[in-house]
């Protein structure tokens, strides 16, 4: 993780990275892909909600389990903030039978 951070700043500042290994260069490419994937996953989740506006979070998860898993693993805070809120069950009126009547 530290290598990625250092490599990112080396790249941003335009410094010579002769020390940089192939794995670090690969990590920079992966970071860019991760950002693109995160944006795409977020958009897919929002589109799924638009397609099924009355669906609960669990129903959306069942419709697209792979998408939900990716967001849950990598972007959980965003997922929780951009998912349908919990629906409290309606309170039923006490319907006891009065057997003495």
Image: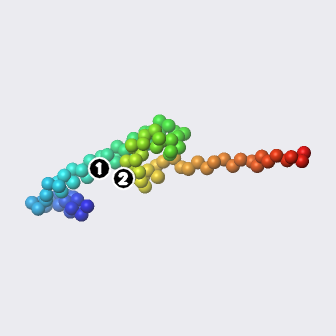
The answer to whether the residues at label 1 and label 2 have Cβ atoms under 8 Å apart is: yes
Q: Nearer the viewer, residue 85 or 61?
A: 61
Q: Nearer the viewer, residue 62 or 36?
A: 62
The residue most toward the top is 51
User: Mark 1 — residue?
Assistant: 34
* Left or right relative to 44: residue 97: right
Q: Name the residue rendered at 79%, 48% in the picture.
A: 96
- Please say if 62 is above or below 3: above
- Please say if 98 is above or below 20: above
Which quadrant of the figure contains the N terminus?
Answer: bottom left
* Left or right relative to 86: residue 13: left
- Please say if 44 is above or below 72: above
Quarter of the view holding residue 47: top left
Q: Name the residue rendered at 48%, 48% in the picture.
A: 83
Q: Position of residue 77 (x, y in %)?
A: 43, 55
Q: Name the residue rendered at 38%, 52% in the picture.
A: 73
The residue most toward the left is 18
The residue most toward the right is 101
* Mark found first going from the N terminus, 1 or 2: 1
Q: Position of residue 74 (x, y in %)?
A: 36, 52
Q: Name the residue rendered at 9%, 60% in the picture.
A: 18
User: Mark 2 — residue?
Assistant: 74
Q: Nearer the viewer, residue 22 or 32?
A: 22
| Residue 13, visible in the rendered structure | no
* Left or right relative to 73: residue 84: right
Q: Position of residue 44 (x, y in %)?
A: 39, 41
| Residue 99, visible in the rendered structure | yes
């Amino acid at each position: 993780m530290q290598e990625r951070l250092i490599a990112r700043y080396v790249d941003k500042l335009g410094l010579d990275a002769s020390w940089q290994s192939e794995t670090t260069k690969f990590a920079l490419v992966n970071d860019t892909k991760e950002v693109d994937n995160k944006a795409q996953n977020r958009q897919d989740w929002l589109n799924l909600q638009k397609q099924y506006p009355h669906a609960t979070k669990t129903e959306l998860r069942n419709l697209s389990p792979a998408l939900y898993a990716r967001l849950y693993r990598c972007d959980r805070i965003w997922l929780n903030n951009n998912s349908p809120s919990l629906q409290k069950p309606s309170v039923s009126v006490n319907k006891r039978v009065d057997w003495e009547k």
